Image (cartoon, grey):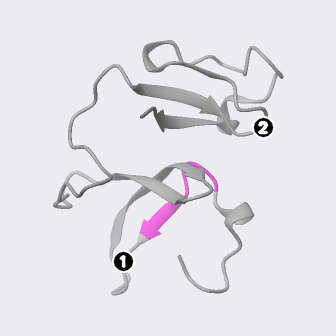
Amino acid sequence: MSETTDRRELKPGMVVYDEGGERVGTIRGVDEHGFYIKADPDVEVLAGPNQSTEHGDALMWRCWECGEMGQIENIPEKCPSCGAAKEEIYYWQED
């Protein structure tokens, strides 16, 4: 993330580029720690101490507006709690 980008400007679905200008994927979630991406198929992803290369039961959806969460296989058309549009719902991995 560039020094001039405000985190409030980052939204799920935005394209992410590396330092060389090559596309690496799209934002799948944003929180107080940074942003998370869904890497494009041709991008090599290395697992680190805070990431996983496999999705277990902990992969959820979360509403950007109110924080409501639910199981990933049941992503709603709008948030059942606050009514926010589907564009405000992003992937979330529970610890």
Task: Give the amino acid type for the residue marked by disc 1 in the picture.
Answer: Asp
12 relative to 67, above or below = below
Circle number at residue 65: 2
Alpha carbons under labels 2 and 1: distance apart: 28 Å
Where residue 5 sits: x, y (%)?
A: 66, 77
> Which quadrant would residue 8 be assigned to in this image?
bottom right
57 relative to 94, above or below = above
- Mark 2 or mark 1: name the one nearer the start of the chain: 1
Q: How many residues crowd mark 1 within 10 Å: few (<14), some (14–19), many (20+)? A: few
Q: Is residue 15 magenta?
A: yes
Q: Give the residues in magenta.
A: 11-16
- In the picture of the structure, the residue carrying the numbered disc 1 is 18
9 relative to 38, above or below = below
Answer left or right for 27 relative to 32. left
Answer left or right for 85 relative to 1. right
Q: Residue at x 19, y 54 (%)?
A: 47
Quarter of the picture containing the C terminus is top left
Q: How many residues crowd mark 2 within 10 Å: few (<14), some (14–19), many (20+)? A: some
Q: Residue at x 38, y 82 (%)?
A: 21
Q: Is residue 29 magenta?
A: no
The label nearer to you, 2 versus 1, is 2
Answer left or right for 2 relative to 82. left
Depth check, front residue: 35 or 74:
35
| Secondary structure of residue under mark 1 | loop
Where residue 90 sits: x, y (%)?
A: 56, 37
| Main secondary structure of the magenta stretch | loop
Q: Residue at x 61, y 86 (%)?
A: 3
> Which quadrant would residue 75 be assigned to in this image?
top right
Where residue 41 sits: x, y (%)?
A: 21, 51
